[in-house]
Image (tube, grey):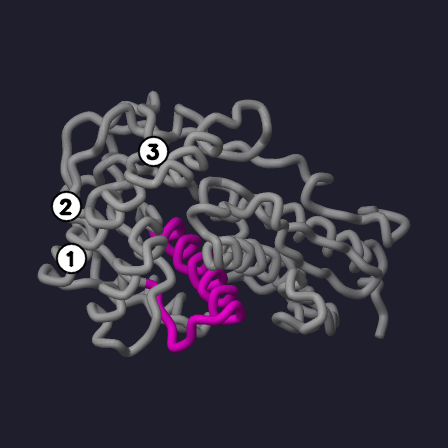
């Protein structure tokens, strides 16, 4: 197998390094970016970084693995957009539980135009925690968004009005439980006070006051500087990302599904905000299972809507420098 593309094009290792770098745009819980890529001559490896795990909020590593899954999907799409669609080996080595995926089996072919569009969306995707406009999300857009989840092997269930109220109740209960936990409050303060580190949530992406929403948003314990203005979320759609298993490989696929859903929503002009609080507390996660009629396990809930056109987009959260998340020491030449 040749690792060189036709004359004038770039070698595989350059594409691998660039895909790993682009994956740095992926969403992660509290913008912790808990991943590390290793570029090898003919493969790309993804590992979780335990140092950036939220130990109090996410002791099992569920959200850590979902975050890494989102980065995995970003890298997959970046490679497909360059004509290098990968074979993905998920959790390939039981002796290395932190090794989440290996991308291999590369043969250069045609560029995937759908992947090109998603890569463009990676650079503009962001979280806007303010209330959405009164414009409804179209049924066609919702179909495309839920189909994106299905293609990644997970399900996105759009909630009806009764289920939305059940979600609101569960989210309120989870917020109360977490507010009474000093370790959680301390951890939240840490990730909202990370100025200059490339991680965490700066004040300018957090609302200056609690937005008026049916399903309560997370209380970050401190006011941000993002003006919210008037508005509610009456036209918002709420959904649950879920699957049939509750194991690390299913969490990884949930992250891939989250990335696919979010990038598709971005392409369609739909705002998405993940709501993880309700899955962080065991009791409310179980309540979500009942909402799913016991069919599967909830990984994440989310709000979908059309952003208020009167609002300027909030700034992007900071990102770690590429050398902090991508190790190219094993390859020589361009891209290393």
> Contact (CB < 8 A) between labels 2 and 1?
yes
> Contact (CB < 8 A) between labels 1 and 3?
no
Q: Which residues make up the magenta segment?
A: 241-268
Magenta: predominant secondary structure element?
helix
The percent coordinates of residue 290 (x first, y second) are: 21, 70
Residue at the farthest top position: 225
The percent coordinates of residue 325 (x first, y second) are: 68, 44
- Disc sitting over residue 77 in the figure: none
Callout 1 crowding tier (Cα within 10 Å): few <14, some 14–19, many ≥20: some
The residue lying at 39 percent from left, 67 percent from top is 149
Horizontal relation, residue 175 to residue 253: left or right? left
Disc 2 to disc 1, C-alpha distance: 8 Å
Out of 30 and 237, give the one closest to the viewer: 30
Q: Is residue 248 magenta?
A: yes
Q: Quadrant of residue 254?
A: bottom left
Q: Quadrant of residue 3?
A: bottom right
Disc 2 to disc 3, C-alpha distance: 18 Å
Horizontal relation, residue 67 to residue 302: left or right? right
- Disc sitting over residue 164 in the figure: 1
Q: Is residue 267 visible?
A: yes
Out of 322 and 192, give the one closest to the viewer: 192
For the N terminus, which image quadrant? bottom right
Label 1: state its secondary structure. helix
Label 2: state its secondary structure. loop
Callout 3 crowding tier (Cα within 10 Å): few <14, some 14–19, many ≥20: some
> Residue tagged by mark 3?
220
The percent coordinates of residue 118 (x first, y second) are: 50, 54
């Amino acid at each position: 197998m040749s690792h060189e593309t036709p004359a004038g094009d770039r070698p595989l290792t350059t594409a691998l390094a660039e895909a790993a770098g682009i994956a740095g745009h992926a969403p992660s819980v509290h913008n912790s970016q808990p991943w590390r890529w290793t570029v090898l001559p003919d493969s790309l490896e993804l590992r979780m970084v335990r140092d950036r795990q939220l130990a109090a909020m996410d002791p099992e590593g569920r959200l850590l693995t979902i975050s890494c899954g989102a980065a995995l999907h970003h890298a997959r799409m970046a490679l497909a957009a360059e004509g290098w669609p990968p074979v993905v080996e998920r959790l390939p080595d039981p002796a290395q539980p932190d090794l989440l995926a290996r991308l291999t089996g590369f043969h250069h072919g045609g560029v995937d135009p759908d992947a090109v569009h998603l890569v463009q969306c990676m650079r503009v995707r962001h979280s806007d925690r303010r209330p959405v406009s009164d414009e409804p999300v179209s049924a066609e857009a919702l179909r495309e968004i839920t189909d994106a989840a299905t293609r990644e092997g997970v399900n996105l269930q759009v909630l009806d009005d009764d289920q939305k109220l059940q979600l609101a109740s569960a989210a309120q209960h989870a917020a109360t439980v977490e507010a009474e936990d000093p370790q959680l409050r301390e951890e939240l303060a840490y990730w909202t006070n990370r100025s200059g580190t490339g991680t965490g949530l700066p004040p300018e992406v957090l609302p200056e006051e609690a937005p008026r929403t049916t399903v309560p948003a997370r209380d970050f314990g401190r006011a941000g500087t993002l003006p919210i203005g008037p508005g509610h979320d009456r036209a918002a759609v709420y959904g649950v990302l879920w699957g049939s298993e509750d194991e690390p490989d299913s969490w990884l696929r949930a992250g891939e599904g989250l990335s696919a859903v979010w990038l598709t929503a971005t392409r369609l002009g739909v705002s998405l905000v993940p709501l993880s609080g309700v899955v962080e507390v065991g009791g409310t996660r179980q309540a979500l299972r009942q909402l799913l009629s016991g069919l599967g396990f909830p990984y994440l809930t989310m709000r979908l809507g059309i952003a208020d056109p009167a609002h300027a987009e909030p700034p992007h959260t900071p990102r770690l420098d590429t050398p902090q998340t991508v190790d190219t020491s094993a390859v020589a030449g361009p891209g290393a």
